[in-house]
Image (cartoon, rainbow, N blue to C red):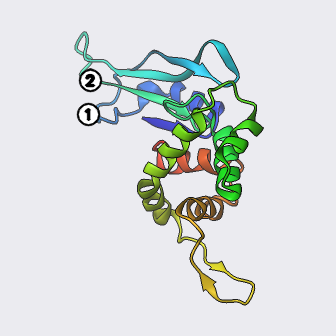
Amino acid sequence: MWIFASKEQRDRRLALLKCLPCPHCKHTGALKRHGFLKGYDELNFKQKAIRAIRVFCSDRANAGGCGRTFSVWIADKVKRLFLDADSLWQFLEQAATTGSKSQAFRDLQSSLSDSAPYRIWKRFLQAQAAIRTALTAIGPPPKHVHQDGVPSPAQSAAQGTIAHLKAAFQDSSINPIAAFQNATQRFFI
């Protein structure tokens, strides 16, 4: 799996497929486009949209590849989630700050069900350990300081993760979730 910050970066890499090694077998010259991963997304919820591109390491006609496939994503998409990275960030940031998942989700004006914010929040909480471990490799967690100058722990694990994401990707031109996916080459939740 490859994750890119923009379509332009993805398309530049895909133009050079024949020159790139397979991430599985490391054979060069056998990579070919192999269709699309389609699904519903926030901007086009009435019909399926392209969410990623499949790449095939050809083992046909003496190509020498391994026959496996992998996907090429843009960082603004989150695997197995209707929301894009921007909407997910808005929801998580507001829900962690206010404590109201339903209100944070209502503010997105999404067409998902009323139970969706709770399922998404649960996925976020279950991914805490993996997210924080990956973030620690990028940079240390921010120090939380009370008004009297005494360091204190974050109010909750979710707020700590949100603060860590903000600190780790404060200079990024894309939102922290997309920047996380691009930097770590793994999906956020």
The picture places residue 60, in percent across and down from the top left corner, at 25, 12
> Which residue is the site of mark 2?
65
Q: Is residue 105 above or below residue 18?
A: below
Going from N to C along the chain, the mark reached first, 1 or 2, is 1
Q: Quadrant of the N terminus?
A: top left
Left or right? Give the position of 138 relative to 106: left
Residue shown at the point (36%, 34%) measured from the top left: 21
Q: Is residue 68 above or below residue 123?
A: above
- Is the Cβ of the residue at disc 1 closer than 8 Å to that at disc 2? yes
Residue shown at the point (26%, 33%) measured from the top left: 25
Q: Is residue 155 above or below residue 188?
A: below
Location of residue 141 by image quarter: bottom right
Give the residue type that dot 1 points to.
Cys
Residue shown at the point (57%, 31%) measured from the top left: 10
Residue 25 tag number:
1
Q: Residues within 10 Å of mark 1 (few under 14, many from 20)?
A: few
